[in-house]
Image (cartoon, rainbow, N blue to C red):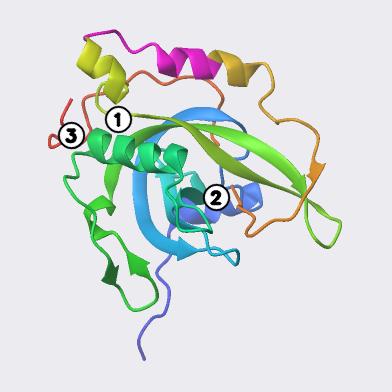
Amino acid sequence: MSAVFQYNEEKAIAADAGGGDYITESCVVRGFIEQAKWVEASSGAKGLELTFESEHGKKANYLTLYYQKKDGSINEVGDQQIQSLMGCTGAQSLSMTNNGSAMIAPELTRKPVQLALERENYVKGNGQNGFRFQIKCIMSAKSGLTIAEYKAGKQAESAGYWAQRFAQNPQGEPPKQQATQASGQHDYSNSYVPPADDMDDTIPF
C-alpha cells in the first residue's frame, strides 16, 4: 500500500488560517510567475493571464493583460505591459505552447518579477461581491526598477509611489455593478519590500 499523503507540519499549521493563501489587499509584491496563459474573452479580446505567487507563498490569479481588442486592433496598454513584463524578466520572445490544459508562454514560467497590484471590487452576476487585481506597474524583482527607470538611470521610485498610494486604501473602492469575465481569488501586506539578493541571477537589471 502506497501513501497518498506525507505529513507536512507547516501545511497543517497553515490550515488554521482558513485557506488564507491568497493576496487580498492592494500591494507592491515580489514573487514568481507560476504560469502565463494565453486567453480569449467571450467578447473576442485576447490576453495573457498570469498566475502569480509571492516570495512568501501568497497567490494572485487571473491577472490578465489584454493586448488585443475584440475588433482585432492592438490594446496599447496591455501590449505595453506585456513588453514591460518581458523586459523585467529577461524574456526576448513569447511563444504559444500547449501544456496539456492550456496554451501558455513557457518563457515566463517561474520568472521572478515585482508587481504593483491594485484591488478592484465588483458585484458578480449573481449579486455577490467579488474582487480581482489590476496590474498597475511591473518592476524588476532584483532591483525594484521599472524599465523606464532603468533606462533613464533613475532610482526605484515607482514601487514606493504605489505602496504609499495603496496604503491609503488597501481594500479598494466599494464594489461596482458590472459584467465580469473571471473573478480572482487573490496579500500579503501593503508595504513595499526592498529587493533582496536571492532572486534569479538571469534577471537583466
Mark 3 and mark 1 in contact? Answer it, CB < 8 Å: yes
Q: Residue 117, position in %: x, y? A: 52, 34
Q: In the image, is 38 to the left or to the right of 98? A: right
Q: Nearer the viewer, residue 53 or 1?
A: 53
**Residue interval drawn in magenta:** 153-163
- Residue 203 marker: 3
From this view, report whether residue 7 is shown above or below residue 66. Answer: below
Q: Decide which of tag 2 and tag 3 comes sooner along the chain.
A: 2
Task: Tell me the residue at 64%/60% (across/down).
Answer: 181
Foreground disc of the pair 1, 2: 1
Q: Which residue is depicted at the point 42% across and 46% down?
A: 53
When the figure is inspected, residue 88 is found, relative to residue 1, above or below; the finding is above
Q: Are marks 2 and 3 in contact (CB under 8 Å)?
A: no
Q: Residue furthest right?
A: 127
SS state under label 3? loop
* Callout 3 amino acid: Ile
| Residue 159 forms part of the magenta stretch | yes
Circle 1 residue: 141
Q: Secondary structure at mark 2?
A: helix
The residue beneath circle 2 is: 13
Image coordinates of residue 91 in percent, x first then y, are: 19, 44
Return the x and y of residue 65 as percentages of the image width and height: 46, 47
Find the distance from the CA under tag 1 to the CA under tag 2: 29 Å
Task: Determine if residue 55 is in view.
Answer: no
* Disc 2/disc 3 C-alpha distance (Å): 34 Å
